[in-house]
Amino acid sequence: MATDSRADAPGAPAHPISMGMMRHHLVIFVALLALGLVGPFFLYPIFLMKILCFALFACAFNLLLGYGGLLSFGHAAFFGSASYVSAHAAKEWGLNPEFAILLGTAAAAVLGLVIGALAIRRQGIYFAMVTLAFAQMVFFFSVQAPFTGGEDGIQAVPRGHLFGLLDLGADINLYYVVLAIVFAGLLLIYRIIHSPFGQVLKAIRDNEPRSVSLGYRVNQYKLAVFVLSASLAGLAGATKALVFQLASLTDVYWTMSGEVVLMTLLGGMGTVFGPLVGAAVIVTMQNYFATFGAWVTIIQGVIFVISVLLFREGIVGVLGRWLKKPL
Amino acid sequence: MFELLGIPPQALFGQLLLGLINGSFYALLSLGLAIIFGLLNIINFTHGAQYMMGAFVAWMLLDYLGINYWVALVLAPVVVGITGVIIERLLISRLYHLDHLYGLLLTFGLALIIQGLFRNQYGISGLPYQIPPLLSGGQNLGFMFLPNYRGWVVVASLVVCLATWFVIEKTRLGAYLRAATENPVLVGAFGINVPRLITVTYGFGVGLAAFAGVLAAPIYSVNPNMGADLIIVVFAVVVIGGMGSILGSIVTGFGLGIVEGLTRVFYPEGSAVVIFVIMAIVLLVKPAGLFGRAA
């Protein structure tokens, strides 16, 4: 999504960051890690884990939208199917949690390869519609497939023992494992963004015809980032399945795809830390407003409208402009 | 009576009719989407919600004011179309200078708001809407029983689709519209009020969705989510047909409805996904869609 606002964003580095992290990014990562480490002493670990999973999901989505310029409206397909696969693997096959999560992630990667290969044949709005339609296909499959449990989902998924040793039944143990997974995912995304691959992605996002004329195989780059994003979304979904010991239709329904778009938009698309903030805000809102019923949907809709009309840079985008630093 | 491929003809023709009816809704909705997309370059994600509003407005007219189906068939699209005009003037018109995708996101947000409001007010259980007395009952065609109302839905939607096609392809107003799609600045220079044309077009497209909603009200129960899943199928229909031509969206809409109906006869498990499977195949073979111009 090439926007006029970001292309000449003040404070954008004149040269791509070629090695190492920018120092203020390093500071923020360390601060986030510190917050994550002490978090469970102040807040309910399950709530924090939910934020962490959605933060990874939103960052994976932002890798595709913010850096690849591809608006997928079907990312719930990867999030949800990975959670089904890992829940099934952990419950029915008795796999260790680490293998269950890996298997879920791999399933999302394969699905991402198939859907991505078809979807990148169309651009822009069509791309969004195609991904949405395929996600709905995955949803219908999940409703009917024998192993997904239909409306009930897969319940009572065992968390198991990490590497057969660490009991994940205790929330606090699981919390630090989830923190490690999510943090590793975020660092990977950061690394991808600032790699030569990431620079080519941004070039494609900003001006596809120019990238083609420079000799880049644009479609291969798009497919690669689609698969990466799908896999990381899958990692988030698989982890969430273990946290809540549940894989359900909600995770694969198209409203979930909308939610992750909202998190990214609200936090600031194309920023490193925006989706984290967006995920935290939306999850917190859902948790505290849960009793308002349909009002949650309405509020989300209002946030969508306001974000699109008045607040396209998102929370972190605005913050970055004030601080004159890309965040 | 004889059997076709081991399927009793009543079941076959029954499903064909059902497919044709679904096809009527696909055609009306994808036609509205195509018209709006043509001039505004925006995929109207609110379309499903506006279809639902059409059904609800018809229900409210009857329940609160005692206004019957036939008046509602005209009045509800006008009312919903006016809300569309307001939305276009207040919100969507602010996005034309931006990437198309922001329009998609804005209309998605609007759909959430509208559906949420109706859900708060009326719950999700669905409200009944009686078939108008004139169209109750049905005809025995010998090989199948045709409920009058269902026949009417197919005919009405065909007529409206073809009339729309005629206006856009054969009249002066349609010529302005098509010209403005190609080059709004030049058309504006000829003294045509392009922003007003855009607003009216959006209102008309929304009205088509609401018209479909009124047609649907007596068949399905009127509920806030009735448009939410339908709109995604319609998106698939649009991708399959390609948005190049008005006639394309009508033909694809009806055609895919029929295909879906046939699938329900021969392989019921696949009926929910057959359109998406076709979409995958079309994307492989002809990415621009069956009737679309190459991008």
Image (spheres, coloured by chain):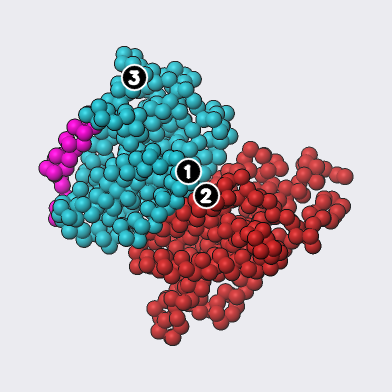
Chain colours: A cyan, B red
**Viewer-closest of A186 and B238:** A186
The kind of secondary structure element at disc 2 is helix
Residue annotated with mark 1: A293
The kind of secondary structure element at disc 1 is loop
For the point 59% across and 69% down, the residue is: B78
Which residue type carries mark 1?
Answer: Gly
N-terminal of the pair, mark 1 or mark 3, is: 3
Is residue B150 toward the left or the right of residue A206 in the image?
right
Residue A38, position as x, y percentages in the image:
22, 29
Which residue type carries mark 2?
Answer: Asn
- Check the image and name the residue furthest to the bottom: B191
Instruction: Say which mark, if any, is on residue A170.
Output: 3
- What secondary structure characterizes most of the magenta part? helix
Residue A231, position as x, y percentages in the image:
36, 36
The kind of secondary structure element at disc 3 is loop
Instruction: Say which mark, if any, is on residue B98.
Output: none
* C-alpha span from label 3 to label 2: 39 Å
Residue annotated with mark 2: B120
Is residue B260 toward the left or the right of residue B45 in the image?
right
The residue range painted magenta reads: A13-37
